Image (tube, rainbow, N blue to C red):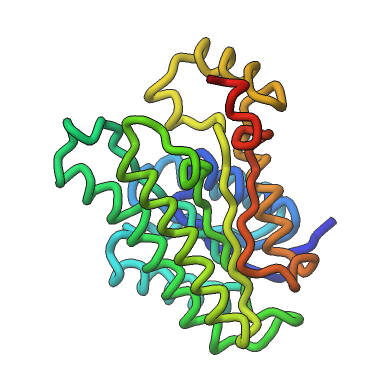
């Protein structure tokens, strides 16, 4: 199925991990893709080549989502390249893990500037462009925000990240209400424990595999799991879905006791 043939998607933080999984899933269904990251340039170019191998177009545009001027330039360059942006996935995030009594304000701000404020900058810039677009076919654009189950299940050592994810859920609901009259869909996905390079900075391979077996679904999630959920929300099938928060967590939240 090529649900996105002729459409263009921009995914922030898509050089690796969840963002890369989303980019590949959308490309598999025909979307041209703007790969974005503030670093990881070599990985971003590898992702671009993988996407092009699927028979669609792709480009890497470097930008730091915590900087509104860079985000504005990112959207403008993407539109100049592809004519319009039909799908924007605000995925980029950052976290410094430390307990509240030990963390510094600089560490808190470093997390919030990307994980919370970055989402605001990306969604605002996307909305400003999408409002001016004609419907394609019935929606002017799809905005998907990647949050986390940590928005409702607090994890120790992640206070700034936890509160940033909770904040962007409420922000997305506000934006959905404001953009509904313009027929722009805004939805949120809250991933559970996902197998990404970032997780390996904190857990061993053995810990990840054993932890996955204790999850209700019996395995840790993959970036492709999140990509498939994004593909639904970004498709015409979800034209009547806005302001929703979709858990993609293998039952993590509803059966938290299974891994405690």
Question: Can residue 83 be spotted in the picture?
Answer: no
Q: Residue furthest front?
A: 257
Q: Residue 111's spot in the image, x, y percent?
A: 29, 47
Q: Residue furthest right?
A: 1
Q: Residue furthest top?
A: 206
Query: Along the horizontal axis of the image, is 49 left or right of 90?
Result: right
- Quadrant in the picture for the N terminus: bottom right
**Is residue 259 or residue 176 the one in the foreground?**
259
Q: Residue 72's spot in the image, x, y percent?
A: 36, 74
Q: Residue 212's spot in the image, x, y percent?
A: 61, 20
Numbered-mark total: 0
User: Which residue is rendered at x = 23% and y = 35% of the image?
Assistant: 100
User: Which residue is rendered at x = 68% and y = 34% of the image?
Assistant: 250
Query: Along the horizontal axis of the image, is 3 left or right of 129?
Result: right
Question: Can residue 102 be spotted in the picture?
Answer: yes
In the rendered image, the vertical position of residue 38 relative to residue 97, given as above or below: below
Q: Quadrant of residue 99?
A: top left
User: Which residue is rendered at x = 32% and y = 57% of the image?
Assistant: 64
Query: Along the horizontal axis of the image, is 181 left or right of 126?
Result: right
Q: Residue 33's spot in the image, x, y percent?
A: 58, 60
User: Which residue is rendered at x = 17% and y = 31% of the image?
Assistant: 102
In the rendered image, the vertical position of residue 3 relative to residue 216, given as above or below: below
**Is residue 101 or residue 132 the one in the foreground?**
101
In the rendered image, the vertical position of residue 24 relative to residue 1, given as above or below: above
């Amino acid at each position: 199925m090529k649900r996105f043939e002729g459409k263009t998607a921009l995914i922030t933080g898509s050089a690796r991990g969840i963002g890369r999984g989303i980019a590949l899933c959308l490309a598999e269904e025909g979307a041209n893709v703007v790969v974005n990251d503030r670093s990881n340039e070599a990985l971003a170019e590898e992702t671009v080549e993988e996407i092009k191998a699927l028979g669609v177009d792709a480009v890497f545009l470097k930008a730091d989502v915590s900087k509104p001027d860079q985000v504005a330039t990112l959207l403008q360059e993407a539109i100049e390249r592809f004519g319009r942006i039909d799908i924007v996935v605000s995925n980029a995030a950052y976290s410094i893990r430390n307990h509240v009594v030990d963390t510094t304000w600089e560490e808190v701000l470093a997390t919030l500037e990307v994980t919370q404020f970055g989402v605001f900058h990306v969604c605002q810039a996307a909305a400003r462009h999408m409002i001016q677009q004609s419907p394609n076919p019935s929606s002017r654009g799809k905005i998907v925000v990647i949050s986390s189950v940590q928005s409702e299940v607090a994890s120790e050592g992640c206070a700034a990240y936890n509160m940033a994810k909770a904040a962007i859920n409420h922000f997305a609901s506000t934006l959905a209400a404001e953009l509904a009259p313009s027929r722009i869909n805004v939805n949120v996905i809250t991933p559970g424990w996902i197998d990404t390079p970032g997780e390996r900075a904190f857990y061993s391979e053995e810990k990840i595999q054993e932890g996955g077996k204790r999850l209700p679904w019996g395995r840790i999630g993959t970036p492709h799991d999140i990509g498939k959920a994004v593909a639904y929300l970004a498709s015409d099938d979800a034209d009547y879905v806005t302001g929703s928060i979709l858990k993609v967590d293998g039952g993590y939240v509803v059966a938290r006791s299974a891994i405690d």
